[in-house]
Image: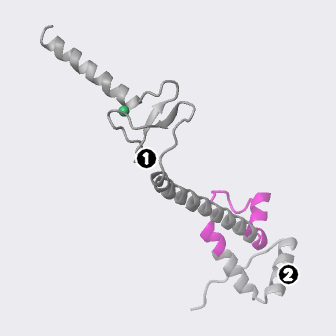
Amino acid sequence: MPSPRFTVRVPDALAAQVQARIHATGATFTALVQEALATYLADTVPTGIPTGMPTPADTRAGTPRALQETLEALTRRVEALEQALIASRQAADTLPTGADSRPPAYDPTRYRLGGLCTRGHNYQGTGRTLRRVPNGACPECETAAQRERRQRYHAQRARGQ
Ligand SMILES: [Zn+2]
């Protein structure tokens, strides 16, 4: 059974482009039309515009050359997006391990590393204590002392003192 045959009229400009493509690639007219149609149908969705009233944009986009250029531009954009995605994924993967391998930075205008405090608060395994810049106090000791004062206070209130 022979495959369906379509007879179509094409504008002069489009016909010239088709002739040029056939001349350049050596493809047959049938192969060119089949490939163009298959590509177009695979990559576009119906717009609901009646085929009898093509808009100028539709006519331009429907030519094989414009279609191929559009496809190539789209391919480049997708590739660029993929590259950006991969780069951001790699950055997300490497950031935590990079942070683990060295102590997190502290604000040097507010803290400095000093000798080990009385409670032995060891900053990131450095054997030293992070201390406030103005008075050299250990913030962790201050927090702990505060917590102990609160606990003593609540214990006294619970005993009714
Ligand atoms: Zn301390």
Rendered location of residue 75, percent (x, y): 66, 67
Rendered location of residue 65, percent (x, y): 78, 72
What residue is pinned by disc 1?
126
Q: Nearer the viewer, residue 16 or 54?
A: 16
Q: Nearer the viewer, residue 28 or 6?
A: 28
| Front of the two marks 2 and 1 | 1
Q: Residue furthest top?
A: 161
Q: Residue at x 26, y 23 (%)?
A: 148
Q: Nearer the viewer, residue 6 or 65?
A: 65
Q: Amino acid at mark 1?
A: Thr
Q: Is residue 114 left or right of residue 3?
A: left
Q: Nearer the viewer, residue 95 or 103?
A: 103
Q: Is mark 1 within 8 Å of ligand 1?
A: no
Q: Is residue 5 left or right of residue 8?
A: left
Question: Which mark is on residue 72?
Answer: none
Looking at the rendered structure, the secondary structure element under dot 1 is loop
Q: Residue furthest left?
A: 159
What residue is pinned by disc 2?
20
Q: Is residue 70 left or right of residue 95?
A: right
Task: Answer with the quarter of the image where residue 47 lies.
Answer: bottom right
Quarter the N terminus occupies: bottom right
Q: Is residue 114 left or right of residue 56?
A: left
Quarter the C terminus occupies: top left
Residue 98 magenta-drawn? no
Query: Which residues fall within the magenta stretch?
Result: 39-67
Rendered location of residue 57, percent (x, y): 77, 58
Looking at the rendered structure, the secondary structure element under dot 2 is helix
Q: Residue at x 51, y 38 (%)?
A: 106
Residue 45 in view: no
Along the polypeptide, which appears first: circle 2 or circle 1? 2
- Mark 2, Cα crowd under 10 Å, few <14 / some 14-19 / many 20+, is few
